[in-house]
Amino acid sequence: MSPRPSEIFRNIMRFVRFISGCIGVDAYDPSYRFNTITAFTTGSIIMYMCFTSVTVFKEFKKNWMFLIQAFATTGSVVQGINKLCVGILSARTVSELYLQIENIYLDFEKDHDPRYPKALLNNCSKLKRVLLLVGAIYVIGVCGIILTTVVASIITGHTYLSMHFHLPGLDVNTKLGGWVTLAVHCVCVVIGGTGLYAGDMVIIVYLLQSFVYADFLKFKVDALNTHVNIVQNDKLQYQTSQMLVDIARWHQIFTTFIAKCNDMFFILVSVQVASSALCIVITIFALLTSEWLGGYCYLCILVSNLYLYCVLGTMLESCNDNVMYEMYNISFYDLRAEHQRFVFFMLVKSQQPGVIRLLGVMPLSVSSALQVSECCKLCD
């Protein structure tokens, strides 16, 4: 017997919650509280900022490019701080939406229409693929940064550092001091990559659920169109009213879900896209004018960060288009006048789709990423 969609979704979420728990921000748990692991993650960020500031102040007079490289990597730290704050401050909303999605899986996987459980299975498969793809990008980027510096240090005998801070009391020019500092850098890179991935998982999990809402609305409209083609009597007219109310209720649930996502994510995506674009320009400049071995892998992470959220925003726009199309696909002329007026109301609501706003101005989409990329080219 094949596993139920809810079981597959729970297995995916176990992995998501494990990664989030590694940095102490399992916001999917309704009883989540600030804990020891969260404090360790916060302390690591504070340590990085303090040590980097002191090191840049000391090294700036010798090599001003050290400041440029440090500023580029600090962009990812800003993203990490942003995601950590969103996870902690929006923990209640995250857990509420998670329970809402889980209940949808539990309710509709038992539906007599086989299209509902099939749509849930397809969405689980899509969610798994996206999470694995993004995870692979982070693994390749983090391992690339670490291996590049470690291998280069072994081959050349000169210690290359992954990050841009020195530890107090250790001289990086000595063999012991250099390798200890590099080891601490590698640990920080792993923690940073895990934290960024955990933050990305939240928006990936929730925005991909928009496909479930759009597919289910299509099924409900198909059922309504089939129903109204039957010769209508008073009993069937009552059923038609109930089906229209169910469609309107489902559309309202969808728009409310997207509105909550926008309230929770608009700062996150704005900081992500803006900082990624700025750091791409700085990183390219640093790579062209100085020696920075880990910068190439770091640049790959920045580019993926820039386009990841914008692709998700475009997918949400596609779902909104599908929802609006299904509203117009209702057999309008087969309905009675009172039902037509009800459909008019739903058509008006579908003209105002919920979107994730970038900087509170433009919708999050690939076209927005292209505009940001064009600005990067001009700056470069």
Image (spheres, rainbow, N blue to C red):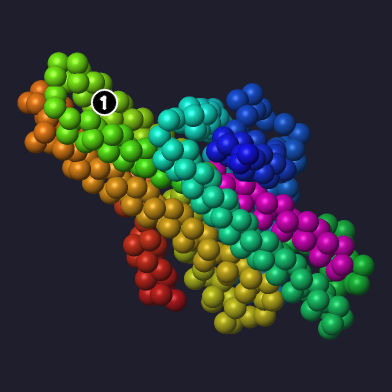
**Residue 153, picture quadrant:** bottom right
| Along the line of sight, the residue nearer the viewer: 107 or 316 | 107
Question: Considering the numbered disc 1 on the image, is that residue within a helix, a strand or a loop?
Answer: helix
At label 1, the amino acid type is Met
Please give left or right for residue 116 compared with residue 288 in the image.
left
Please give left or right for residue 340 compared with residue 314 in the image.
left
Res. 51 in view: no
**Residue 366 in the image, given as x and y percentages of width and height:** 38, 61
Residue 7 sits inside the magenta stretch: no
Q: Which residue is pictured at 83% across the width and 62% down the height? A: 183
- Residue lying furthest front: 231
| Along the line of sight, the residue nearer the viewer: 379 or 323 | 323
Q: Please state the extent of the stretch shown in magenta in the rendering.
A: 178-204
**Residue 114 in the image, given as x and y percentages of width and height:** 44, 38
Q: Quadrant of the C terminus?
A: bottom left
| Along the line of sight, the residue nearer the viewer: 162 or 366 | 366
Please give left or right for residue 123 compared with residue 354 in the image.
right
Identify whether 315 is placed above or below 141: above
Res. 19 in view: yes
Count of number-bearing discs: 1
The secondary structure that most of the magenta stretch takes on is helix
Q: Which residue is pictured at 65% across the width and 49% down the height? A: 195
Q: Which residue is pictured at 28% across the width and 49% down the height? A: 321
**Residue 245, picture quadrant:** top left
Identify whether 41 is placed above or below 237: below
Give the residue number, with chain letter if any, for mark 1.
243
**Residue 193 in the image, given as x and y percentages of width and height:** 66, 55
Q: Which residue is pictured at 21% across the width and 36% down the height? A: 225
**Residue 261 in the image, given as x and y percentages of width and height:** 43, 38
| Along the line of sight, the residue nearer the viewer: 181 or 209 | 209
**Residue 174, picture quadrant:** bottom right
Identify whether 88 is placed above or below 338: below
